[in-house]
Image (cartoon, rainbow, N blue to C red):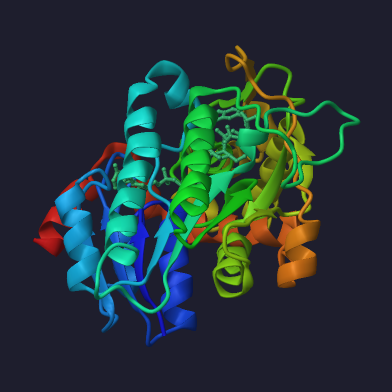
């Protein structure tokens, strides 16, 4: 049995992970610490609020006393570290928060973990600090380059990627220098339920349903490797369970695709939904599909992102061989689940878009 501190558990992947973990390991204790930034939404955890071993704490990973008290008082033995500023575009416009949370915040967690788990008399018998990182630390690939392996040299290109690379190095150093029992996973682009609609796939879905332009950066040829979020959670579980301490593992979705093709696939899936479920026309009257027009008509090419990495691709051979990791979803099945969830949870994304989810949380959780 484990007792987990999940940082950033009210964000997209963190919330999916908490839902996954409490379902799979109902006897484990799960404490979430989340600062509830614009991307954090306690409503994402509504499904686990009544779980007998779940606790939510609003707080900053940079708050040393708070993190220390959670680890010591709760006798927690595992940290799964998701908390971060995660959006590349925001890091281009305002990088400071990325350094503060992703670098200094991670370092604070490592310091507290070291003091609590290595330098204290009543440390738990075993411990694990699992750090959730990204393929963006490896930089960008050309069309014929081999996919990223765990040996690919780091070459981060955006302030976001640089801040994640710095945090990966700190995690590695705390293992090498102090013997902290760490692991790191570097994964590709996630998509699925609860993703904040600033990221490509949920943004395209909400804009298509509300009749707004679908902004495609540059010529849309940039390639990402799409990973359904539950496959990512499964991969992290395997690393924590079977991964070797001090190692890093790549987690991918085997779904490389150009952005323009992703957007067109999303458009076609929406058209198909409206064709088979005519009641959607009354629910989303501003969607082109409600008027019989193709959703693709909303595609608009816009100015490219500064320093836009062209291609990411994950080679997950090490995870496959050592951990038996394999994604369950392909892009079609993952998109069906994601789109189905977005159609069934209009109130979630509308509240996120207009900010009213904050009032809902205040009413329900204070
Ligand atoms: P997200 O932006 O949806 O969620 C981040 C969460 O962290 C939010 O709940 C936010 O409130 C919380 N947070 C931010 N600053 C904090 C602080 N100082 N203290 C406590 N909590 C804080 O992000 P996500 O997409 O769920 O990503 C989670 C992790 O996975 C990140 O570390 C990210 O770098 C990594 N990752 C994401 C993807 C992806 O495709 N989304 C891919 C690879 C890696
Ligand atoms: O690769 C993993 C990374 O994936 C994570 O580390 C990041 O946290 C996560 O945000 C994501 O980064 P990207 O920049 O790849 O994701 P985003 O959804 O912002 O963009 C995906 C691609 O789509 C990228 O090439 C930029 C493009 N794009 C994005 C948006 C928001 C558009 O063309 N239009 C858009 O409106």
Q: Position of residue 55 (x, y in %)?
A: 24, 71
Horizontal side, residue 26 vs residue 341: left or right:
left
Residue at 68% from the left image edge and 36% from the top image edge: 263
Looking at the figure, which quarter contains the N terminus?
bottom left
Give the residue at x 50% y 57%: 193
Query: Residue 133 or 8: which is nearer the viewer?
Result: 133
Quadrant for residue 141, please give it.
Answer: top right
Residue at x 21% of width, y 58% of height: 68
Q: Is 54 positioned to the left or the right of 226 in the image?
A: left
- Asked if residue 235 is positioned above or below residue 124 in the image, the reply reads above
Is residue 212 in view?
no
Residue 19 is at least partly visible in this image: yes
Rendered location of residue 361, percent (x, y): 19, 56
Q: Is residue 304 left or right of residue 313?
A: left
Image location (x, y in percent) of residue 319: 73, 62
Q: Residue furthest right?
A: 144
């Amino acid at each position: 049995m484990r007792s987990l501190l999940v940082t950033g558990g009210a964000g997209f992947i963190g919330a999916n992970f908490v839902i996954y973990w409490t379902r799979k390991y109902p006897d484990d204790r799960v404490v979430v610490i989340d600062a509830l930034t614009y991307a954090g939404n306690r409503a994402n955890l509504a499904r686990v609020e009544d779980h007998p071993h779940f606790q939510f704490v609003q707080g900053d990973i940079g708050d040393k006393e708070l993190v220390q008290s959670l680890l010591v008082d709760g006798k927690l033995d595992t940290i799964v570290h998701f908390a971060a500023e995660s959006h590349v575009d925001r890091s281009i416009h305002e990088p400071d928060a990325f350094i503060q949370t992703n670098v200094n915040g991670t370092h604070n967690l490592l310091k507290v973990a070291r003091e609590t788990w290595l330098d204290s008399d009543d440390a738990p018998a075993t411990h694990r600090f699992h750090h959730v990182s990204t393929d963006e630390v490896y930089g960008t690939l050309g069309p014929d380059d081999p996919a990223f392996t765990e040996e690919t040299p780091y070459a981060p290109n955006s302030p976001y990627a640089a801040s994640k690379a710095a945090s990966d190095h700190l995690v590695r150093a705390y293992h090498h220098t102090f013997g902290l029992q760490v692991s790191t996973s570097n994964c590709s682009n996630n998509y699925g339920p609860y993703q904040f609609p600033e990221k490509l796939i949920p943004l395209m879905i909400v804009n298509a349903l509300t009749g707004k332009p679908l902004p495609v950066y540059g010529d849309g040829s940039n390639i990402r490797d799409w990973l359904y979020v539950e496959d990512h959670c499964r991969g992290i579980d395997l690393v924590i369970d079977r991964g070797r301490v001090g190692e890093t593992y790549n987690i991918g979705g085997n779904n490389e695709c150009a952005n323009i093709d992703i957007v067109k696939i999303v458009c076609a899936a929406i058209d198909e939904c409206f064709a088979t479920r005519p009641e959607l026309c009354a629910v989303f009257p501003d969607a082109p599909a409600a008027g019989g027009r193709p959703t693709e008509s909303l595609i608009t090419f816009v100015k490219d992102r500064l320093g836009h990495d062209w291609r990411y691709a994950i080679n997950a051979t090490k995870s496959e061989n050592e951990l038996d990791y394999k994604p369950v979803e392909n892009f079609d099945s993952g998109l069906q689940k994601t789109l189905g969830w977005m159609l069934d949870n209009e109130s979630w994304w509308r509240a996120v878009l207009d900010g009213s989810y904050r009032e809902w949380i205040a009413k329900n959780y204070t």
